[in-house]
Image (cartoon, rainbow, N blue to C red):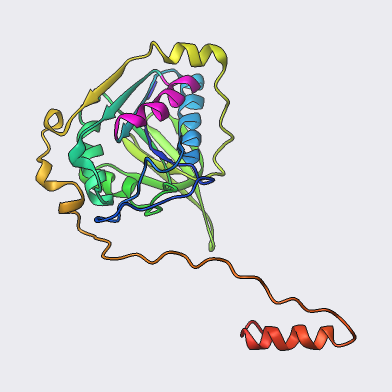
Amino acid sequence: MPNIVVLIKQVPDTWSERKLTDGDFTLDREAADAILDEINERAVEEALLIKEAQGGEVTVLAMGPERATEAIRKALSMGADKAIHIKDDAIHGSDAVQTAWVLAGALGQVEGVELVIAGNEATDGRSGAVPAIIAEYLGIPQLTHLRKLTVDGERITGERETDEGVFKLEATLPAIVSVTEKINEPRFPSFKGIMAAKKKPVEVFTLADLGIDPSTVGVANSGTAVTGVTPKPARTAGEKIVDEGEGGNQISAYLVGQKII
């Protein structure tokens, strides 16, 4: 009966306009609608499937501002048992390495965690590196970018699909895995689940609670920095060609001129 922790993240809705803040060029999370990242829904679903088959407990772990509570409640309404929310202003602008460091610290607060499940990459950053960095910090095996996951006692196996083919991976617990969109189809929260989520426990940690020095995280201490941005140019009207007998030649000439052919 594995004790599972699922890493989740609230991200701007991909259908909303995403903006960067002036000054530090970090993502302006208040400028767009916020949702639980879709890949995290699949990670939660995989944890719930394992729990339903083998028992155990599912905890969701999120790092973010107060608003991230909305994403946490969505995961709880799907069926997760409880949640941990890392909430500290000093975290703002942390890069992938710093994020993994904080998450690893929080995982150390979960007693008996055997399996950590994450999405392969968040839609707002797409670094795809956080699960692997956490594995390095915690000294545990990592099975990343899985399209299939099986837990059998103390052993886990998975399938990773790449351009070169499908690879079978295996490891012993405790371990961390990341999943792709092919892993499953997430369930929709029921009305009963939504109401139950309001009563499920959410434990809040600050950096001080985790014993993490604020000077090691945040935009001012990040190993990467954005020094400038350029707005995407407005779309221009395309070139219209009226076929009066030479349409084919005109299209070919246009494609050659654009170096498409």
Q: Is residue 29 above or below residue 70?
A: below
Boundaries of the magenta span: 65-80
Residue found at x 20% / y 37%: 89
Give the x, y percent position of residue 5.
35, 29
Residue found at x 50% / y 36%: 42
Give the x, y percent position of residue 258.
62, 84
Task: Name the residue nearer the viewer: 66 or 184.
Answer: 66
Q: Is residue 218 visible?
A: yes
Q: Quadrant of residue 65?
A: top left
Q: Is residue 66 magenta?
A: yes
Residue found at x 78% / y 79%: 241
Main SS class of the magenta portion in the image:
helix
Quadrant, the C terminus: bottom right
Give the x, y percent position of residue 50.
48, 26
Q: Quadrant of residue 184?
A: top right
Task: Name the residue nearer the viewer: 207 or 61.
Answer: 207
Residue found at x 45% / y 30%: 152
